[in-house]
Image (spheres, grey):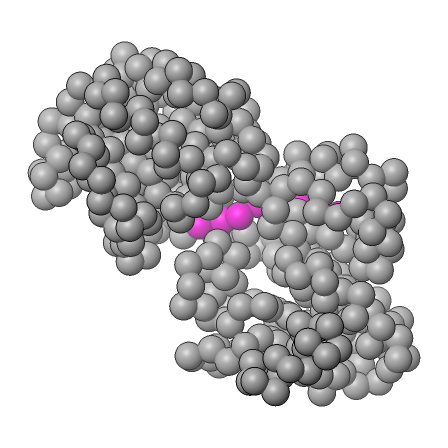
């Protein structure tokens, strides 16, 4: 067993370059992971601006000829398959990680079968959504083709159990984690000083931070502030290019990741009005870990993240403006934030341990 364990190499197939210049929860997690104690050997991904020194890269290209070939063969990942073929050797065992790319998996399986390597390889699929992605027939075939599915929450697993007649592969749960050295609450005097620096003295600070897409619920929140019913409050909006003239609303645009913690720390309330079934909500745990009172939609993985209301207020009908207004007014009657998180809840180090454990268990053939 130990001999086979040592011979198994881990290959990560990523649609995004790693490290990535784009903002994304899973690419951020992998960046932090690959900068420290990790057990990945190869990365197949588009050419990044810089590379991790502790892994071997097989970079994919996206030239005009590549795009023509993809159209002809009706496959958008021919380069990734070609890169994988260069790595694989018949006498070795491999664990192949795929993140969110459902379409590539059948072709990976076909390649392994053609190379007579299917029994030498395990496929580990990481899904960062929440609801079942494939219909029943395609889903059951998909689960037969992989060895393990890794989800973000137990509730997502239950949703899969309820949807599919059978789940013929192993399932694991790995919640997201963040750097608690960066994302931590301030003492009351430190928070007051930060409010003074950011010209927010005497204000209850509300924060919305996301990509400005309809499903993220910014329009709903702005409607609340247009009613101007929350005295001595200010709403900070991060991640939107809007600059509407709404009393009590400050549009800050895009903020560098390195500066985000101070806005979570200065906020009294974090609003997470998602109108879709979020897989997890990384910004939610960033705000939560900075001591912000969280009011969030009870959709997808969010209730489990907030421990079903133990660590925040859940809105049962997220598209109902009166429910949000009531929740905010209820908060304004509280003397302080009543929620105190357990130490290391959602820490990145716990995520790293979980990732290494999931990989190392799978590496045993």
Residue 216 image offset from top left, x and y in percent: 44, 39
Residue 58 lies, in percent from the top left, at: 61, 83
Using the image, determine if residue 178 lies above or below residue 288: below
The image position of residue 121, as x and y in percent, is: 81, 71
Quarter of the image that includes the N terminus: bottom right
Instruction: Say which of 95 and 247 sits in front.
Output: 247
Specify whether residue 239 is painted magenta: no
**Can residue 191 be seen here?**
no
Task: Write the start and end of the magenta stretch as one range.
Answer: 171-178
Residue drawn at (27%, 54%) of the image: 255
Tell how many labels.
0
Please say whether residue 148 is visible from this viewpoint.
yes
Q: Is residue 285 left or right of residue 74?
A: left
Q: Quadrant of the C terminus?
A: bottom right
Q: Which residue is drawn at 89% across and 75% down?
A: 113
Whether 174 is among the magenta residues is yes
Q: Which residue is drawn at 86% across and 47% down?
A: 137
Instruction: Please give the name of the residue rendered at 78% of the width and 71% of the height, measured from the top-left corner.
Output: 108
- Name the dominant secondary structure of the magenta segment: loop
Where in the figure is residue 152, as x and y percent of width and height? Answer: 61, 45
Please say if 147 is above or below 288.
below
């Amino acid at each position: 067993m130990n001999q086979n364990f040592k011979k198994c190499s881990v290959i990560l197939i990523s649609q995004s370059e790693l490290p990535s210049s784009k903002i994304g929860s899973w690419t951020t997690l992998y960046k932090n992971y690959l900068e420290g104690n990790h057990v990945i050997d190869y990365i197949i991904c588009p050419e990044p601006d810089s590379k991790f020194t502790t892994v071997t890269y097989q970079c994919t290209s996206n030239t005009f000829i590549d795009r023509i070939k993809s159209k002809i063969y009706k496959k958008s990942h021919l380069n990734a398959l070609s890169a994988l073929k260069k790595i694989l050797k018949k006498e070795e065992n491999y664990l192949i990680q795929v993140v969110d790319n459902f379409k590539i998996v059948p072709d990976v399986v076909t390649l392994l079968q053609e190379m007579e390597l299917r029994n030498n390889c395990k496929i580990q699929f990481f899904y960062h959504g929440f609801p079942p992605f494939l219909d029943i027939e395609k889903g059951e075939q998909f689960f037969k083709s992989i060895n393990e599915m890794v989800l973000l929450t137990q509730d997502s697993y239950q949703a899969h159990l309820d949807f599919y007649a059978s789940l013929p592969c192993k399932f694991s749960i790995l919640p997201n984690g963040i750097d608690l050295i960066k994302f931590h609450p301030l003492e009351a005097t430190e928070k007051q000083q930060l409010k003074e620096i950011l010209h927010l003295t005497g204000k209850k600070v509300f924060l919305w931070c996301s990509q400005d897409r309809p499903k993220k619920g910014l329009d709903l929140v702005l409607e609340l502030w247009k009613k101007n019913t929350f005295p001595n409050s200010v709403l900070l909006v991060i991640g939107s290019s809007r600059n509407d003239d709404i009393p009590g609303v400050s549009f800050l645009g895009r903020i560098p990741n390195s500066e985000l913690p101070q806005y979570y720390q200065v906020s009294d309330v974090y609003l997470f009005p998602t109108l879709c079934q979020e897989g997890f909500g990384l910004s939610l745990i960033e705000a939560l870990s900075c001591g912000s009172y969280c009011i969030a939609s009870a959709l997808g993985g969010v209730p489990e993240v907030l421990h079903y209301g133990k660590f925040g207020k859940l809105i049962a009908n997220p598209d109902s403006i009166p429910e949000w207004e009531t929740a905010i007014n209820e908060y304004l009657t509280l003397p302080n934030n009543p929620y105190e998180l357990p130490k290391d809840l959602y820490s990145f180090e716990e995520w790293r341990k979980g990732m290494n454990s999931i990989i190392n268990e799978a590496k045993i053939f």
